[in-house]
Amino acid sequence: MGGTLVPETTRITLLGVKVETKLAFGDHLRSAATRARQRLGVLNRAAHITPAGRTTVYKAFVRPVMEYAPLVWMGAAQSHLQRLNNVQRHALHAISPGAHLPSSAIRRTVSSLACLFKLHYLSGPPQLLSVLPPHHITSANPRTRSEHSNVSGHDHQLQHQLPASAPLALKRSFPHCSISDWNSLPVALLSQPPHSKIMQSFKTNVYRHLRSTNWLWAVDSL
């Protein structure tokens, strides 16, 4: 590069994310889980405060370590993502018997849908906008619409573009893994351009909608 020999390596750290040649993100998630477990000790030292207070401590000091740049690595294998789930389960034990929190999986899903929401309405870097799948072209004829069971008829639907033969890791990555969830959202959630208050309302309503479809997936509890 520019006349300089660049040594080959199997992994690099880029803006805090450990990237491997095969984009498995096992190293990154292993490191994130280790650092988060090290911070769990703060919950033990907070045993004198209420469960609500310990929950706040967990959200402020532990969970952010596990949720840095999730759109980059959310397509990792479930065996790697499980490390983060295990940390949250240990945190629930430390918080209180019967405690429950939104699962790591649904928080990543809501984060990805919020990003799609912003890209849907706002301009941004061309490299980022280029990952936004094209919209379905919906027919004005209700009979024609009904022939396409995967199209609910509103103008916010996104197309699935990956072939069936695409690698599983690619199908699990952003934005491809989020298109079905996006297309399942009620049109009322997608009808207002985002600003600070709308974005928080959007995330809250998306979480409620997804939780209503599968409580066990949406919540980690003891």
Image (tube, rainbow, N blue to C red):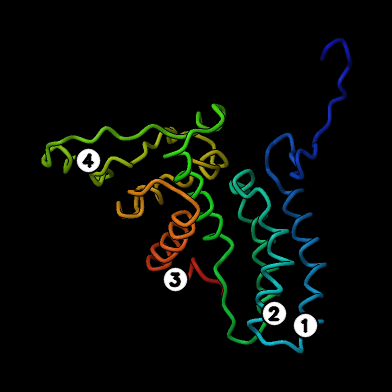
Q: Is residue 35 left or right of residue 54?
A: right
Residue on which the image places disc 3: 215
- Residue at the image point whose x is 65% and y is 61% from the top: 82
Mark 1 or mark 2, which has the lower sequence index? 1
Residue on which the image places disc 4: 148
What is the three-letter code of the residue carrying label 1? Ala
Binning the other alpha carbons within 10 Å of mark 3 as few (below 14), some (14 to 19) or many (20 upward) gives: few
Residue on which the image places disc 2: 54
Mark 2 or mark 4, which has the lower sequence index? 2
Residues at marks 2 and 3, CA–CA distance in whole angstroms: 23 Å
Tag nearer the camera, 4 or 1 = 1
Mark 2 or mark 3, which has the lower sequence index? 2
Quarter occupied by residue 51 = bottom right
Quarter occupied by residue 205 = bottom left
What is the three-letter code of the residue carrying label 2? Arg
Quarter occupied by residue 161 = top left
Label 3 element class: helix
What is the three-letter code of the residue carrying label 4? His
Q: Are marks 2 and 4 in contact (CB under 8 Å)?
A: no
| Disc number placed over residue 46 in the picture, else none | 1
Image quarter where the C terminus lies is bottom right
Label 2 element class: helix
